[in-house]
Amino acid sequence: DGRWHFVAVTWNSAGGEVVVFKDGIIAFEGGPYRADQLVEAGGSWVVGQTPVTGSRPCHALAGCDFEEGYGFIGDLQNVRVWNRARNQRQVQDGMKWPFTAYQGNLK
């Protein structure tokens, strides 16, 4: 639609719950997704495109490819990664600009 939007995705390892917020409002709740798995140090994090092996998604970047034409098209600004899932109020507080919310656990 040509406008900037604030998007936040939370994932909680315990249970695998996923919540997607668009402009501070819950747009999706689902799961379980990779319940009880951990995000390990030293890995890679990809934003905007799904790595693939052949025609299937690839969950470890070693041996994965990125297919042209399947990625995010647009602009990203102010990407933050936290070490815990944020609740709706915390997400909404993080939408304020300039960002001055408490920054504990921001990685």
Image: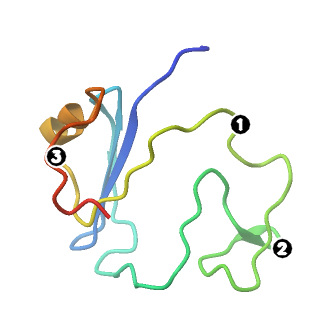
Classify mark 2: residues with Cα within 10 Å, few (<14), some (14-19) or many (20+). few
Neighbours of disc 1 within 10 Å: few (<14), some (14-19), many (20+): few
Of helix, strand and loop, which one carries label 3?
A: loop
The dot on residue 73 is: 1
Q: Quadrant of residue 7?
A: top left
Is residue 36 shown above or below 7?
below
Provide the residue designation for mark 2: 54
At 54% from the left edge and 15% from the top edge, which residue is drawn? 3
Towards the viewer: 26 or 61: 61
Residue beneath the point at 51% across and 37% down: 77
Counting residues from the N terminus, which is met first, the one under dot 1 or under dot 3? Answer: 1
Specify the amino acid type for callout 2.
Answer: Gly
Rendered view: 19 above or below 61: above
Q: Which labelled disc corresponds to residue 87? A: 3
Q: Specify the amino acid type for callout 1.
A: Ile
Locate residue 78 relative to residue 27 in the image: left or right. Answer: right
Measure the C-alpha gap from mark 3 to mark 2.
37 Å
